Amino acid sequence: LALRGVKNINVCLDTQSAAVEYDFRELSMSEIVRAVCNLGFSAKPAISSVAVGIQDATLLIGGMMCRDCVRKVNEKLRAINGVHKVEVSLEDNQASVSYEVTLTSIEQILEAVGELGFVVNLPDNIPPSKVIFHLDHLSCELCATSIERVLVDKPGVNHVEVSLSERSCSVSFFDYQLKPSSIQEYIEATGYNCHMKTLETPPQLDSALYRYWLASIVKYDYVVGVTCQSHVRHIEEELSRQRGVMGIKVSLELSTAAVVFLLQKTDPEEIRQAIANMGYECSIIAGLAEKDDEISTETEVLPPINEKSPLLSPMDDRAQLHASQRSLQMVFQKSIERLSNLSRASSQNTFINMNTAVLQKAFFIIRGMTCLSCVATIEKNLQKVEGVHHVLVALLAERAEVRFDPKLITSEQIAEAIDDMGFDAAVLEDAECIQGELVLFISGMTCVSCINSIEKTVLRIPGVLSASVSLSNHKGTFTFDPDIVGPRAIVEAIETCGFNTSLPSSAEVRTAARLSHREEIRKWRAAFLISLLFGVPTMALMIFYMTATPSTEDRHNQTMVIPGLSLENALLFALATPVQFIGGRHFYRAAARSLRHGSANMDVLIMLATNISYFYSVIVLIVAMAMNQAMSPMTFFDTVPMLIVFLCLGRWMESVAKGATTEALTKLIEMEPTTALIVDPDDQESDKEIEAQLVSRGDILKVLPGTRVPVDGRVLEGQSQVDEAHITGESLPVDKGPEDIVYSGSINLNGVLIIRATHVGQETTIGQIVKL
């Protein structure tokens, strides 16, 4: 425990206990317990701190709205004799106090805070609240379990129960730690739409949750603004009778109102409607929702105004009422000040950040680049051009991606700037942004509702273009814009819904590719052999009859099987039929798919030619036999085997060539590592190993000596030598330092490199080679 104030620690393994000697002026017991829990152990005080004279207490303070309030509470508590340590949080509306029980008491501390005009209570005296949500599309127990698993670990949640029959979720929670809106967000993050049915809060919270809301009031009947003081009194008197409204202050000068109300009894829309019913048009300006502003959005927990709390026994009803009134007065004062600031800011248009420019992205085709020096020249010189914010050049693809401010420069001017450097550049008008694709195996899905939950959750992520999940093979395919979102965000969103994900291994992908080409080779080889088996006799028979009957005058010497059918045509029909329907069946399937999509390809032409030859011959033979002709007509059965045999041979040879190419590309792809070490930008000493497919553009990675570079990137820190033989063919290692480019699959020989990913997925150099 490297904590300031800890003097000595004795840990006993047998008794599972630890004795800690510490300075209570610098450290509290709760901080020690929290530090032990952060180490992964379960800890709690074995001996009450009262026994040693020091007590830790957490106060829930309502009414703090600014840093000045925090300062006042801090000074007031430190002035109490016996209080040694005070920590006040404006964000949590809480204060942690360490005090000596022999010199002061918790009642004196609570009374001191109440004298400042704030209302204070202890967490132990606030029972949990209960909220019930209705869940849409809840259809299986696994869905219910996933929601329970997500909620049960959230801070402030006491108990969770999901009913599948009623499609509801009942949550018991502590209102000073968690809000119903946050619970609703947690549920919707799992992919299920929900809305709140009921909310039950303890009486201690009825006057505890104040929210400050600003409203703009305008006279309805063609009169702009609140024109007289009578309008102000009318609004204040009528609205003060509204259920849940604790107070209202209307400003005649600004035509605005500050309203303090109870969230459990009313909402901003009801207040707006009440003002509208008085004959005024009212619109909500904004809720004061920023803790960093001068006004706090809400006071988390306050004791009841009309009920005497046992903790505040030293304070009488008058003191409680005085504290509440002072708190409301502070609210009104701060609210009106904020309204004035908002009005002035609105008139000066200070809400608009004029310095924030909307950047555009353009792609350029660049000819004449021969090495990395050309890439560095283009990137460095373009970065100096006014209006250009980001430049990324791909050497092999001969493309450049540039982000620029269209108000300062155009894409044509950027192309001219590249031309001035000695390269030929042109704008790609119809260039499409490279989309990232992520394929995941998703376990835990049991029904269609699970699919809808995953797809809706993922599609809510900005930058996700499409999401397709299959229940049969438990696989999901997602496309996204890599400039906006990365694959890790998609994985985290799915796991937040309660499902487990895994990436298909690169070995499985390569094996599937090999099997696919092997199956293709076997298919066309079998089709060729079948066609050849019947095609060779067809050719021999055709040559024989052409030699035996060289002229058409001798056709009356045909050997007739039946009238109209000669032996030659009978044999050709028997040999051509298997070739047409067995050897050529793959052409039939491909042609049918093409026609189904409204297009015609080469397979359609092949089937058109062979079918015309075959069925024409069949029809003329049937007609000749039906008419009992003495001679058999001329047929074209020999065309079918000859054509299909050579086409199947060509497809077979093409598949063999593709298979060899795939094997070569597979060996190249195998050079890419499957994992990467991602580094936290704030703490580069800590790193985390992730799948290389989950690396996003802009991630900072660490490359250790002897490992391969996972993606294309630019060196930020470190010096090393890198073997790039698989890309450049250069056998000697290349020195790399800051601002140098490294390629995926390169071997880092010595030294640690910190790089920033610039090209990932299909954008890497190896990906471009495979694409070509």
Image (tube, rainbow, N blue to C red):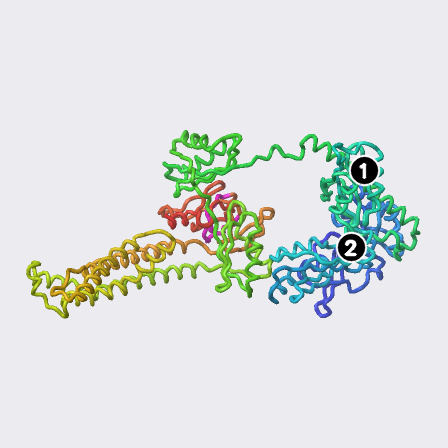
Tag 1: amino acid: Val
Q: Quadrant of residue 547?
A: bottom left
Of 97 and 250, which appears nearest the observer? 250
What residue occupies the far front of the structure in this picture?
A: 627
> Label 2 amino acid?
Ser
Q: In the shown orientation, is residue 420 left or right of residue 623?
A: right
Instruction: Judge left or right: residue 745 versus residue 519.
Output: right
Residue at disc 1, secondary structure: strand
Q: Tell me if residue 654 comes above or below residue 358 in the rendering.
A: below
Residue under label 1, please give it. 250
Question: Within the magenta stretch, is there residue 606?
Answer: no
Hey, which quadrant is residue 590 in on the image? bottom left
Labelled disc at residue 28: 2
Q: Which residues are magenta?
A: 700-715
Name the one closer to the observer, 79 or 181: 181
What's the distance in space between the residues labelled 2 and 1, CA to CA? 46 Å
Q: Position of residue 153 (x, y in %)?
A: 67, 60
- Residue at x-position 38% and y-position 33%: 423
Instruction: Find residue 630 and report its image quarter.
Output: bottom left
Looking at the image, can residue 365 be seen?
yes
Question: Measured along the vertical axis of the image, is residue 225 above or below residue 272?
Answer: above
